[in-house]
Image (cartoon, coloured by chain):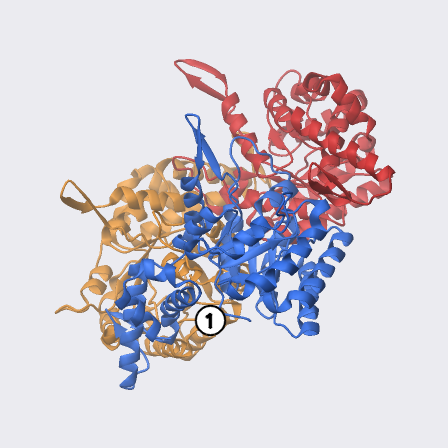
Chain colours: A red, B orange, C blue
Amino acid sequence: MTKTRLCRTFQTAPAAVPRDDSAKYLRSGLTAEGFSAPDWLVPDLEDGTAPEMKDEALENVRELLPEYAPAFSGEIWPRVEWAYDSESLRERGVEQIETLAETVGEHVDGFVVPKVGRLEDVNAAESAVAAAGRETGTDIELAVIVESARARSDLREISKFGHESLLTALVFGPVDYTAELGGREIGKRPDWSGLCEALSNEASANDLLSIGGPFDRLFRERAGVTFYNGDGYADHVEREARVGLDGSWSLHPNQTAQANRIHLPTTDELRTAVSKIETFVEAKGTGTGAVAIDGQMVDEATLKNFENTVETVAIVHGMQDEQTKERYDDGLLDRALALR
Amino acid sequence: MTKTRLCRTFQTAPAAVPRDDSAKYLRSGLTAEGFSAPDWLVPDLEDGTAPEMKDEALENVRELLPEYAPAFSGEIWPRVEWAYDSESLRERGVEQIETLAETVGEHVDGFVVPKVGRLEDVNAAESAVAAAGRETGTDIELAVIVESARARSDLREISKFGHESLLTALVFGPVDYTAELGGREIGKRPDWSGLCEALSNEASANDLLSIGGPFDRLFRERAGVTFYNGDGYADHVEREARVGLDGSWSLHPNQTAQANRIHLPTTDELRTAVSKIETFVEAKGTGTGAVAIDGQMVDEATLKNFENTVETVAIVHGMQDEQTKERYDDGLLDRALALR
Amino acid sequence: MTKTRLCRTFQTAPAAVPRDDSAKYLRSGLTAEGFSAPDWLVPDLEDGTAPEMKDEALENVRELLPEYAPAFSGEIWPRVEWAYDSESLRERGVEQIETLAETVGEHVDGFVVPKVGRLEDVNAAESAVAAAGRETGTDIELAVIVESARARSDLREISKFGHESLLTALVFGPVDYTAELGGREIGKRPDWSGLCEALSNEASANDLLSIGGPFDRLFRERAGVTFYNGDGYADHVEREARVGLDGSWSLHPNQTAQANRIHLPTTDELRTAVSKIETFVEAKGTGTGAVAIDGQMVDEATLKNFENTVETVAIVHGMQDEQTKERYDDGLLDRALALR
């Protein structure tokens, strides 16, 4: 079940909401198509689901995954309950991991564990996921939400641990983080740019994915009309892409459609990557180890970025070819796919 | 003497100035009332006092504390001399700590030690304070000013040490810090936002207080008139509050009055906190461990932020009820105080 | 060959370019005068030189240094090939270091090693430089370019190692850094302010030099006319000077002339420094250890910044007296030089 890592979009969907169809949002996420289909769908058993609906939420996940997961194009990562400073929440989290691994483990790519603390707490979360994977014979990974001062303090150690464990992704959680630091919302919100830099850096240094935090100003109002805040979210995602975060958190199919597009290589990026690799492969056929392309030395190491671009496009194509066909012309896409 | 930690305002007052009444500013700080009374008054034996007046400064502190400290509502934290790179200054600091602890130790809550270096230097400062406390049977704590590259480099270790020692607060000192790094004042000053983020984070991760640096553009001039720069200081304090610094440095009673207000919970913040705790306490009477309030799960852990808000208000009320009575209506204040 | 550390300008010059005179830029850098003469000239054997010209580049350095280095006012720091993730590039780097040390070692102050990784990789680079220095009996130092996530992650450890080794300078490499983190150029570029703060801090904490990254928007166009982008580069250098970076990367003699000026103490800065030291020296003659000057306590420790200012001016004067004579009047300059 482990695939090359890709998570342009991390869309949370409350696993139960107080409606006639309590699984409405979960089902909607699992059946989204085209650019609205998230790379990772995160059925949310934690803060997105009201306390009195936790059991129904678990039930919804158990019911819907067998039905919809096989046709779902992305990965499925339920978010369980957890908190470094609450033993009872950690126990609930372990139970939720065990239950889901036993019942629908073959449809689950990993678990998202929120509110982790220092390295030891991340170790505990990883042990729970590893144990569940062992017992059910499935290959389940871990993503953690960095939203405590302790996790930020230990970020470097946590990330290094990720390099050699099931920990796969670091996700930022600005709301709880700001609350824990005692940040007050006066005028505007802090952008935590130091933390975002560090998250991107440590993820890159240890081959993890890094994912930004949610953007909750979904709608805005002007002259009496309320409309989807596409500008606000684009600014948010572009800021994340600029510092090298691999993906963005989505709270809505519209956000997913935007972030999927922004985090997909542009035509120019793909064309450059394909050309470099083709030239390198050709030259290598003639026996040279390193090759000069357009006056730049290219060897296995420098080729890595180009291969990542092609790999990203190929994975997206395998998941949702509507996306790749919309963006690239057939010739370029075929050349890219031929390189794998 | 150790109280719940609160330091909205860290007001330094030179302990001796070249005037007829050399204790003018010290006395003024110790007798301030209402919102002008600082949470922490810092009689300054270091850079605020001229070299030739150090003895008189020490004398002033020894004379004024017995007279004014008993009626002073906040805490008293003298700043002594110290520098990680000067043995003679460290010796002077130890002497000043010893002298003040012996003579007026019962009026002193802690000592502020500036220009600390790496962890070992903070250890030395803490040992000096601990020894003074032991010998005089008083309970005296330590605050350090982070204003050297070495202290910034060791911030995480220093903060962890704070978690298990007398170290209580981390204060930023931008002027010396910028000088040590060789920062040049060209156009505008650096805001050291990375350092401020880290200070807030490490303080939160280790239950320490974090306090911002001084704002020295006290006055500004427009059209020939010079006036108090309230806008500039408000921006400064709000920026600090936003990233979760617990308090702000004040150089003037006007600044103290502003920062005390900005760092005091708003009516809305207090109302929310009181409601959540009341509902939780009520529900707990019926035997439930965790309670759903307004669709959000509340347990002992998540209650902590609300309890902190109420505790802050209660402490401020105990110190300066003019402040709390001005801000909150009687009903809300009574409900808050009843919860302790 | 080790001098007091000074590197206002770090000018890279491709060691070979595809022109009739392939050493054109290298010669131009080695013969620049006045404010256009860089403090450090960096003959570039790495990315600035095309793969098929590497041999010629090495040849050019070996030919030109004996001819021009003796009259060159600054230091000479060739940049060799290296990459933490490519064994073959590291081997080439070691060969280039050995070859240049053996053939022109007496003209080389140090080597610039790019794309270093974690501490272990920096250790390896330093060993290569140390070995070359030992074998040739020359005193050659090391500068590394911080442009990988791993180097950023280990920055504190790398800098501490610098405190006790041949490592002398930390240089930022934003282009490769952004690429490694997967940063996308959308609208504007990230300014990596957290990294720049950390670079300046760790350099100061360990007595290393810190140098900013290149600014490649050399020219801009307006109303059909293309001209040198002096405004853009001034903003870039001033931002670096503000956070205490010691020097700036230059890609062009015009940039060198600007950065040399911005990083040279102003007349006011020099006048203050000279006065403080003169007063201190005079007072010390009378037996006092610490002296009050303008109401500020000055001792050996606080004198350090002033001495650095005077030292910087004296070194620049020794290298290029056109620069110091242009900026300071004779009286002030003579007083400064008399203090050494």
**Residue extending furthest front?**
C20
Residue C338 image-quadrant placement: bottom left
Q: Dividing the image into 4 quarters, which one contains the C terminus of chain A?
A: top right
x and y percent of residue A296 in the render? 69, 41
Residue C284 x %, y %: 30, 82
Q: Is residue A180 left or right of residue A52?
A: left
Q: Quadrant of residue A269?
A: top right
Say which chain tag 1 marks.
Answer: B
| Residue drawn where x is 24% and y is 69% of the image | C295
User: Can residue C179 be seen in this snapshot?
Assistant: yes
Compared to residue B293, the image places residue A301 above or below, namely below
The answer to which of B192 and B38 lies nearer the viewer is B192
**Image position, residue B34 (x, y; %):** 24, 50
Residue C80 seen in render: no
Q: Residues within 10 Å of mark 1 (few under 14, many from 20)?
A: many
Q: Position of residue B225 (x, y in %)?
A: 14, 44
Which amino acid, mark 1? Glu
Tell me if A6 is positioned left or right of C107 in this view. Answer: right
Could you tell me which residue is drawn at 46 percent across and 71 percent down?
Answer: B126
The image shows residue A45, relative to residue B318, as above or below, that is above
B101 left or right, relative to B36: right
Q: What residue does disc 1 label?
A: B126
The N terminus of chain A - image quarter: top right
Measuring 57% from the left and 39% from the top, which residue is drawn there?
A243
How many numbered marks does the figure carry?
Answer: 1
Q: Give the quarter of the image for residue A110.
A: top right
Q: Is residue A192 left or right of residue C87?
A: left
Secondary structure category for the residue under label 1: helix
